[in-house]
């Protein structure tokens, strides 16, 4: 079966910056999935669970949508991979079943009571030495500054609110930030990079504000010792987002030039018609109409 894109969940047919956002999270999770029993909560279309199953001992994808689960089971088949339909607050699996649990862009889709129930359920399913990786949009950057309202988000969190929710079960955390951005990359090609710098256009070395948080959570610091606090970049081989921006920028420039030409032509036509307007008001209307019609024809595709 095929899923229709509604904006609620990412599909592999999508294009643009959301491709980078969603795939990047799962590639990060793959680094820590090898040989583990993995649970992917809110697995959606199923592409991420399938990616993790390439290295994990086993992967279970859980999603509340029976259609999404049916689609995932039909599209992705691996002996160590299964998808089940269930709410993130009530997952019908035994306690301490998983070494690694991931859940990306889930918590903001449910209300405060359900958020607490969801995290309690993750805590129940995670082994004593397991790690939980969660992502969440940073409300001040995602919504407050932009005025953007995602219709599928019920309760977005800022960093302090997310910290408070997670700390009830996992006192130790490693925080990462994610933000899609255009960038110029300089990297060594004959040796391994020893440092990483992120600079703005003034040369100031500083990271941008997080658009999303990714948090590795554990019951003790020792369980996070294998997590490397690394900077990573993700882009597709065709650099499609940059190519689309370049195409749009070029088209906008060409349109601005055409509008300027049309405005100049319109002023010239109006100046030519204007003397008749002084002596013949009726002709003025017809003349004005003539250049407006010509303008409309030029603008027409």
Image (cartoon, rainbow, N blue to C red):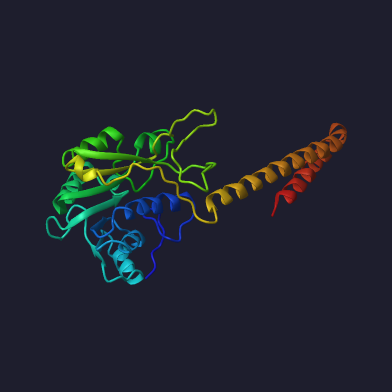
Q: Position of residue 162 (x, y in %)?
A: 26, 38
* Left or right of 290 in this view: 65: left
* Left or right of 239 in this view: 132: left
Q: Position of residue 224 (x, y in %)?
A: 24, 44
Residue 202 is drawn in which quadrant?
A: top right
**Quarter the C terminus occupies:** bottom right
Give the camera-side residue of 64 and 61: 61
Give the camera-side residue of 153 and 139: 139
Q: Is residue 297 visible?
A: yes
Q: Position of residue 210 (x, y in %)?
A: 39, 37
Pick out the residue farthest to the front: 191
**Quarter the N terminus occupies:** bottom left
Residue 255 is drawn in which quadrant?
A: top right
Residue 30 is drawn in which quadrant?
A: bottom left
Q: Is residue 199 above or below residue 243?
A: above
Q: Position of residue 186 (x, y in %)?
A: 53, 42
Q: How many labels sit on residues?
A: 0
Give the camera-side residue of 63 and 128: 128
Q: Is residue 45 visible?
A: no
* Left or right of 206 in this view: 290: right
Q: Residue at x 31, y 62 (%)?
A: 55
Pick out the residue farthest to the left: 95
């Amino acid at each position: 079966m095929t899923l229709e894109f509604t904006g609620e969940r990412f599909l592999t047919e999508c294009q643009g910056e959301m491709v980078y956002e969603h795939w990047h999270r799962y590639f990060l999770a793959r680094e820590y999935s090898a040989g583990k029993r993995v649970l992917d909560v809110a697995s959606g279309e199923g592409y991420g669970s399938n990616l993790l199953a390439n290295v994990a001992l086993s992967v279970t994808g859980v999603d509340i949508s029976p259609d999404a689960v049916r689609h995932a089971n039909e599209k992705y088949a691996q002996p160590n991979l299964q998808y089940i339909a269930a709410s993130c607050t009530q997952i019908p699996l035994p306690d301490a079943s998983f070494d690694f649990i991931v859940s990306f862009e889930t918590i903001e889709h449910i209300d405060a009571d359900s958020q607490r129930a969801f995290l309690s359920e993750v805590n129940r399913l995670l082994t004593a030495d397991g790690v939980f990786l969660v992502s969440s949009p940073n409300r001040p950057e995602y919504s407050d500054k932009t005025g953007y309202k995602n219709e599928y988000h019920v309760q977005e969190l800022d960093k302090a609110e997310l910290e408070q929710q997670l700390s009830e079960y996992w006192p130790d955390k490693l925080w990462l930030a994610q933000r899609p951005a255009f960038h110029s990359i300089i990297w060594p090609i004959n040796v391994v990079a020893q440092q990483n710098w992120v600079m703005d256009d003034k040369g100031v070395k500083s990271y941008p504000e997080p658009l999303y948080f990714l948090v590795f959570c554990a019951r003790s610091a020792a369980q996070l010792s294998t997590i490397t606090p690394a900077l990573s970049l993700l882009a597709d081989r065709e650099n499609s987002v940059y190519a689309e921006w370049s195409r749009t920028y070029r088209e906008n420039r060409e349109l601005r030039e055409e509008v300027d030409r049309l405005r100049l032509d319109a002023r010239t036509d109006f100046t030519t018609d204007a003397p008749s307007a002084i002596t013949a008001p009726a002709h003025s209307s017809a003349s004005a109409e003539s250049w407006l019609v010509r303008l409309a024809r030029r603008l027409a595709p």
